[in-house]
Image: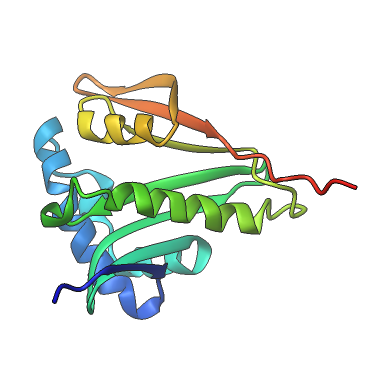
Amino acid sequence: MGMSVIISAADAEDAEQILKLQYLGYQAEAELYGDWAIEPLTQTLESLRAELSEQHFLVARLGDEVVGTVRGHVDDDGIGRIGRLVVHPRMQRHGLGGRLLEALERRLAEDGSPEDGSPVTAYRLFTGHRSLGNLRLYARQGYRQTAVEPVSSSLSFVHLEKPAATPYAATA
């Protein structure tokens, strides 16, 4: 009998597993760009713990193991900022990344803008220009390219955005 993957909010006890998964997940990105000093590979446990208290983190668990994670927050302009979607390599290409992304979008929409609680108007994220699997996933999830930002001679960030779903209005 197999176990199912459960997506839930991360807590402080998940920090080490999230950091290990992040390190494992970003190895392919580092190799793709020839840069082993990217921030996801150099982040400290202390800074990740600080982020856990400042942002929404979701984890996907298979039993006790964290096999996926994503984080984000809503900025003062009502934009849901999404980052570091990571799925364990053995769990990739089974829809888990999309499930994590959708779950975080729902969580951010529930919270709204920290400024005044107004609704989220859009979701934004970015990925590297050579990260074709990521770009395909984001396109399937409704994200569209808005800008390309050159970072170095070997890396450009592709910025993507998706409008937030309009909440259903009550009818009289």
Work out whether residue 1 can be spotted: yes
Q: List x then y, in percent, for residue 73.
A: 53, 53
Figure check: 114 above or below 62: above
Q: List x then y, in percent, for residue 3.
A: 20, 73
At x 34% / y 80%, what residue is drawn?
13
At x 27% / y 48%, what residue is drawn?
95
Q: How many marks?
A: 0
In this view, which residue lies farthest toward the right? 172
Residue 168 figure quarter: top right
Image quarter where the N terminus lies is: bottom left
Viewer-closest of 5 and 53: 5
Q: List x then y, in percent, for residue 114.
A: 68, 55
Residue 164 figure quarter: top right
Q: Say whether residue 168 is left or right of residue 128.
A: right
Residue 144 figure quarter: top left
At x 23% / y 54%, what residue is drawn?
87
Q: Say whether residue 26 is left or right of residue 95.
A: left
Work out whether residue 131 can be spotted: no
Q: List x then y, in percent, for residue 79.
A: 60, 41
At x 61% / y 40%, what residue is drawn?
165
